[in-house]
Image (cartoon, grey):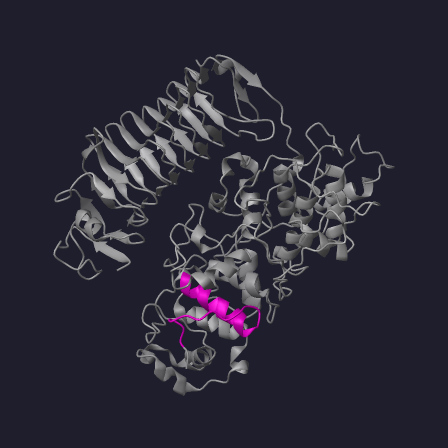
């Protein structure tokens, strides 16, 4: 079984099903295999458990959003007392863990995931990361632990994102050669928010440490924390009652872009100014929260060119990896070579040259800001008009000192951020960067834009698709490939298949493998930007989809036109993140409100509502006139309301219905899952001849 159920009122000689759960996690762990989820019912897991609980590779222990499943206990591991030990790719989600006699979680190897848990009341550490482990910890609460909330030692790394640390000695202690990325965490009422000692070299970004009883950031010995660089601002706020920062290390701390009070700092600090072009600060629109006008029109993509030729009109591009991309843009007269017949693919690109290509490639992008005059770009400069256009469109801007620096080389990450910002492609999931071996080099301001570009397959990396090299100057070949892929992303040119485009598929979601029944339906929707996962790297395919989320998916996939007047829903104010898309989905007759003029945007969608929306909005009854005989395929057809039978019959005849896990059971009034909605929307795109058919054993076919 993929899910093993455990409950304090179960029995260990049961089968581990939802109806007959095990009593102990220990018993479930004995049965678990990679990919299994051990689902905990609320209650205390202590008696009968064999501590520490050793979670094997690829196995998940999961509670629920209330975190009312509590693991409490202690057992010896490597001379320490711990409650839970995580192996590579093991996960703990939405559980409370406490160990009055030692440590909550220990991980010594691989990339474990610790997401949305409470680690409280541990005598030593809430979590201890050792050895060469590189875990991902996100949205956890560390509170009232003895020594530290989180300790990272040895040569461990990992990513620590969006956690809360409260009322602990050292909230985070980094020792030995530890070098994690610590980003966007909240620290409150700890003795010291972050202690960095020995030769640790962490990267600290966008953290907020408030009301530390002694020190916000304390460095010792040969520690060298990176709290901000001129090209990658820190965005940290350290606050302590004695010192905001106490640097007892032998080298100065370099700082750029942090909120610091020089009067509350002890030790040597080197202040450096920002060198980031202003476009890095342009906010990107969140995927799923955009207004209808900002969504790309989902037209039929051009036919892919699956076998590009490596021949070229340029004599130095014959056999070159970039030849297909360069030839494609040369055909459009967007790029040209030199008089001697060469293209010089490995030459660096200046900011002015990049602006010129952007202006030519995207002339129809709407201007979003006023023109800015740069003192180092005279009106007779060869690229002044292109720079002005690219700047007003939001692709590229100047520097904080007011200059543009037209002849300065452009880095790869700056080019990617510029394209994502100018085309308003939104933010991606930071977990998508796990595909890159050098992801730690991505500046914090660029994480979400680079993730968005990766998910849209804009990024092209030669020779290794999984090495981004974000801070290197970009070449003419690389720039051409990026711009070509950006045109592909907005359906302006055919796709080119290349081994140098990193694949981002559903395997990048921590809880969705290629073996999942709906993976091949979910992946294309994610790649188009119509559907996304969560910031912790999960997709949660079996979670319900809310009515507002469904409206976002409908508008993104179909960009429907209005068929009826707008209406004001009492529970959807204009400030609600999905107000515009809800209105567009309503006007297109995809989805309606309730008689009391409410919409219930955060209420889970039912299977019946999802199918009725697709049939109504796409007018599918005209495509397939209903035959009620088709409803006999469902063993529970008596539960289909009379008013919905014609629509469900049409949906069935068009193979729009997916029933998991039992194909013959429609269960129309049950909450529909994100996986089921994805499959149904994908099939609607198949009917519209915009996606290829994907067979599924759970698809109802007549």
The C terminus - image quarter: bottom left
Q: Nearer the viewer, residue 689 or 675?
A: 689
Relative to 560, residue 210 above or below: above
Residue ranking furthest to the right: 380
Q: Nearer the viewer, residue 478 or 181?
A: 478
The N terminus - image quarter: bottom left
Task: Answer with left or right where residue 379 lies relative to residue 395.
Answer: right
Asked if the stretch drawn in magenta spans residue 656, the answer is no
x then y, percent, for residue 554: 53, 64
Q: How many marks?
A: 0
x then y, percent, for residue 180: 43, 31
Relative to 680, residue 204 above or below: above
- Can residue 228 be seen here? The reply is yes
Residue at (80% x, 30% y) in the render: 375
Residue at (12% x, 55% y) in the render: 11
x then y, percent, for residue 647: 46, 79
x then y, percent, for residue 600: 44, 60
Q: Which residues are magenta?
A: 675-700
Residue at (39% x, 87% y) in the render: 629
Asked if the stretch drawn in magenta spans residue 682, the answer is yes
Task: Answer with left or right where residue 96 lies relative to residue 221.
Answer: left
């Amino acid at each position: 079984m993929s899910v093993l159920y455990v409950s304090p009122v179960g029995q260990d000689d049961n089968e581990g099903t939802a109806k007959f759960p095990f009593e102990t996690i220990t018993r479930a762990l004995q049965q678990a295999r990679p990919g299994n989820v051990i689902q905990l019912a609320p209650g205390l897991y202590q008696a009968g458990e064999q501590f520490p609980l050793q979670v094997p590779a690829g196995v998940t222990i999961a509670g629920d959003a209330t975190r009312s499943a509590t693991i409490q206990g202690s057992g010896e591991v490597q001379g320490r007392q711990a409650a839970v030990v995580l192996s590579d790719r093991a996960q703990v989600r939405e559980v409370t863990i406490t160990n009055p006699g030692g440590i909550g979680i220990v991980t010594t190897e691989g990339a474990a995931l610790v997401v949305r848990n409470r680690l409280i009341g541990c005598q030593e550490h809430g979590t201890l990361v050792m050895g060469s482990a590189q875990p991902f910890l996100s949205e956890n609460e560390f509170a009232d632990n003895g020594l530290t909330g989180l300790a990272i030692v040895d040569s461990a790394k990992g990513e620590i994102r969006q956690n809360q640390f409260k009322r602990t000695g050292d909230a985070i202690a980094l020792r030995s050669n530890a070098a994690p990325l610590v980003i966007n965490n909240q620290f409150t009422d700890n003795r010291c928010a972050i202690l960095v000692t020995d030769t640790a070299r962490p990267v600290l970004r966008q953290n907020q440490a408030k009301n530390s009883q002694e020190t916000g950031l304390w460095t010792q010995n040969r520690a060298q924390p990176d709290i901000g660089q001129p090209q990658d601002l820190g965005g940290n706020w350290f606050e302590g009652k004695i010192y905001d920062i106490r640097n007892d290390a032998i080298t100065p701390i370099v700082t750029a872009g942090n909120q610091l009070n020089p009067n509350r700092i002890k030790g040597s600090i080197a202040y450096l100014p920002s060198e980031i072009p202003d476009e890095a600060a342009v906010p990107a629109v969140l995927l799923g929260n955009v207004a209808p006008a900002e969504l790309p029109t989902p037209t039929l993509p051009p036919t892919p060119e699956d076998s590009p030729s490596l021949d070229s009109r340029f004599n130095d591009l014959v056999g070159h990896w970039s030849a297909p991309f360069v030839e494609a843009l040369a055909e459009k007269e967007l790029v040209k070579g030199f008089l001697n017949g060469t293209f010089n693919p490995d030459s660096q690109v200046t900011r002015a040259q990049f602006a010129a290509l952007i202006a030519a490639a995207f002339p129809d992008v709407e201007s979003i800001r006023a023109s800015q005059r740069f003192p180092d770009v005279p009106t007779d400069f060869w690229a002044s008009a292109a720079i002005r256009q690219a700047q007003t469109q939001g692709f590229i801007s100047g520097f904080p000192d007011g200059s543009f620096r037209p002849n300065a080389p452009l880095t790869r990450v700056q080019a990617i951020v510029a394209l994502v910002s100018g085309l308003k492609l939104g933010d991606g999931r930071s977990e998508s960067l796990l595909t890159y071996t050098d992801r730690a080099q991505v500046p914090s301001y660029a994480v979400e834009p680079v993730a968005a570009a990766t998910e849209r397959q804009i990024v092209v990396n030669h020779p290794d698709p999984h090495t981004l090299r974000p801070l290197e100057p970009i070449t003419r070949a690389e720039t051409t490939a990026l711009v070509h892929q950006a045109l592909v992303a907005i359906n302006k040119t055919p796709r080119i298949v290349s081994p140098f485009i990193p694949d981002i598929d559903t395997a990048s979601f921590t809880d969705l493998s290629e073996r999942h029944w709906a993976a091949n339906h979910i992946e294309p929707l994610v790649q188009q930007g119509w559907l996304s996962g969560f910031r912790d790297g999960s997709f949660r395919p079996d979670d319900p989809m809310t009515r507002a989320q469904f409206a976002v998916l409908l508008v993104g996939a179909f960009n429907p036109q209005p068929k009826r007047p707008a209406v004001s829903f009492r529970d959807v104010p204009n400030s609600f993140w999905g107000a515009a898309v809800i209105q567009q989905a309503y006007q297109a007759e995809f989805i309606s409100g309730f008689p009391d003029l409410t919409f219930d945007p955060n209420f889970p969608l039912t299977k019946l509502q999802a199918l009725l929306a697709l049939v109504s909005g796409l007018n599918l009854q005209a495509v397939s006139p209903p035959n009620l005989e088709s409803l006999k395929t469902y063993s529970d057809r008596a539960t289909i309301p009379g008013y919905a039978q014609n629509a469900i019959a049409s949906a069935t005849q068009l193979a729009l219905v997916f029933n998991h896990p039992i194909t013959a059971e429609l269960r129309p009034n049950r909450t529909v899952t994100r996986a089921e909605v994805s499959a149904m929307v994908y099939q609607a795109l198949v009917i519209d001849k915009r996606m290829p058919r994907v067979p599924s054993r759970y698809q109802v076919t007549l």
